[in-house]
Image (cartoon, rainbow, N blue to C red):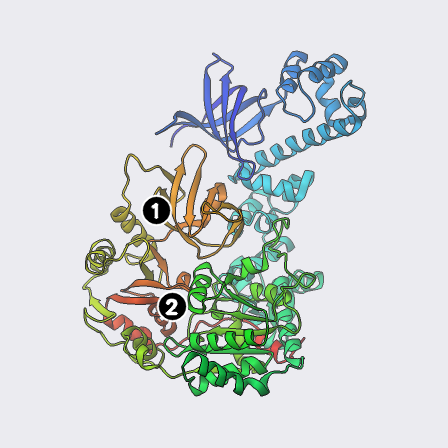
Amino acid sequence: MEETLSISGTVETVVYANEQTGYAVLEVADERDGELHTAVGPLCEVRAGEEVTLHGRFAMHPTFGPQFKTESYEVRLPETAAAIRRYLSGGALPHIGKAIAARIVAAFGEESLEVIASQPEALATVKGLTREKAYEASREFQKMFGVREAIECLARWQLPASVAVALYRHYGPDTVDMLRRDPYLLCGYPAHQDFRAADAIAGQMGLEYDSFERVRAGLVHVLRHNLNNGHACLPAARLVPTVAQFLRVEPQQVESVLRQMCEDGDAVLFGEEEAAAVYLPEYYDAERCVALALRETMRIPQHGGKSAAAAIRRLEAVNGIRYAPLQKQAIEKALGENALVLTGGPGTGKTTAVNGMLAAFEENGDRVALAAPTGRAAKRLSELTGRKAKTIHRLLEVDHTAADSTRFLHNAKNPLKCDVIVIDEMSMVDVLLFQSLLNALKPSCRIIMVGDEDQLPSVGAGNVLASVIASGLVPVVRLKEIFRQAAQSLIISNAHRIVEGLPPQKGTRDSDFFQLECPTAEACAALVCDLVARRLPQSYGYDPFEDIQVLCPTKMGPVGTQALCTALQQRLNPPAAHKAELKLYDKVLRTGDKVMQVRNDYDIPFTRPGGGEDGAGAFNGDMGVIEAVDPREGTVTVRSEDRRLVYSGEALRELELAYAITIHKSQGSEFAAVVVPLFDVPPRLCYRNLLYTGVTRAKDLCILAGHAAEAAGMVQNAMRNKRFSKLAQMLKGEGI
């Protein structure tokens, strides 16, 4: 292992600093010979004129030459009057320039920094500093060294400066003391560090393995981990032994801590005895609020059902069509009920029914809002209806002044100005987002939920569409008839065969669906790459970036997203002298790469080059192409539809290559051509509605590459993702 080196000297220039990430570029004059070194790393709190000792290694940057990569550092306060004057003259503190720095040193000499830190009233006696300015300078000085203490403390635990900065902003001057008392604070907001990392630190500090803090953190960790698996809650009978085994403590200790957490409001126990489930508070509140809001909506009297038949006759006459019986039923219930679920597979006429509803609502003078969970789904809804649709986030408008949670400008105090809302791709809507949407609707607003109940549930926690249907609270219309034109598509007919438990027909090269056999996983990966990079563009004229999407059941293995993204990046966007790139964690991001945002982030800034309002926010599932990479500043610019987004620091972790994505991540999207590799699918992912979701993402062409036996096995497994939730019971009025 390369030896750690140390450099001591004076900071001459701060070339670049990012306060959000902690990353900075400095020029440091070596105290031994005055040579200038470029230092990079977690140095954003270091100021010009300060004396520092840096610990790290030299490395050669391909563009900027030799750099000292700093791993940790110490700042030495200047001690002599001359050094203090030089330090203050560099603009390190607000309102103190060269002239005032000279007066401060003349008045207080070598005690100047102590006066600034602890005697702002005395500092205010210096000519040119008002009381307000003196106090502001003193607060900034205290903050600078509080943040540095946090950075140095966390650096000893191998945690980045960005985490220290975020913690200091949240906890203030007590940050280090609080972490020493309870290192498991690192697991929560705003650090969100892995439990195992915090547990290792706690072990170094000598915290008892069965301490209250450790068991509480373990309970929260298991509950939060399972949110990622879609569970809004966990059965207490499963949670307690799982946590006890994970922490290697007695179940009785876990039960004791859980009881205390419930008393303190850090957890919620819903139900009794064997049926009891444990929630984190925000998810209990979300499911309860959704249930109360929908129950209240269904109680409000509505009018319009009596005129529905006449409205349908007028629509048929104007449009020259005849609605099928179930489509008529859907339009009638939409006009006569407070809420409705419209579900059905591809080719069953959901779009025709929705367009009929919209025309009837508009004829009545109703203000209608159209929304979908993702940008791609909203764009598709606009195209299918000829009306403007927005993502739910854009409809609600994110409140960027909320620092510690996701809040929206539209809420109960500022409701949306609509009489009807139509939500497409409802299976993708998680419980937190649905809570926010319902909270922003007037009590009298009609709610039309449109989706396919055979699709995968939302990426986020909860199973909202399935729970609403199961509760029986809201009327449901299921469209089942496949219309003649749609029946000619093998994509559509095979989708319905999959739902019915029948293997898909193999098709031919002339059809819109076919299967290609491969003897090995490696051969399957090679075939997928060749289809995307050569065969489909040559045979069909598809653009590999815009039209073709590889959808994988899993991330891992030779035909998982990780391996295929690396291989396709090499085929479609190989390294070149004119393409800047950034090596980051386990990936390389290069100009021209196809990428995807993998979680909601409301702080990523964007502009609209074609005109329109600038803003901030990138959402889970957004896809785009990298336009520019700046290795020196560590930024990546992505073009995503009409937006240009700039990523830096920790936000880059949320950006992944998207040449191949999981079927889960494809929900709500539609692609001209879809290639699904099926080879050695892990048993936990070998089930029917995963394959169904992948096939139904294809608009014009779907290719299954691998083993036909894999597809048949997935079809035979009717297992659905088991999601723990009590929303259906709450919608029935139980326990709320």
Q: Which quarter of the rendered picture does the N terminus lie within?
A: top left
Residue topped by disc 1:
593
Q: Can residue 227 be seen in this snapshot?
A: yes
Provide residue 388's location: percent of width, then percent of height.
49, 63
Residue 722 vs residue 339, the one in the foreground: 339
Query: Image point 44% across, 63% down: which residue?
Result: 377
Is 187 positioned to the left or the right of 353 in the image? right
Provide residue 403's location: percent of width, then percent of height.
63, 48
Q: Amino acid at mark 2?
A: Arg
Provide residue 99's location: percent of width, then percent of height.
69, 15
Number of callouts? 2
Is 387 positioned to the left or the right of 699 in the image? right
Q: Is residue 562 above or below residue 592?
A: below
Give the mark toward the camera: 2 or 1.
1
Q: Amino acid at mark 1?
A: Asp
Residue topped by disc 2:
684
Quadrant of the rendered image containing residue 541? bottom left
Residue 285 vs residue 78, the one in the foreground: 285
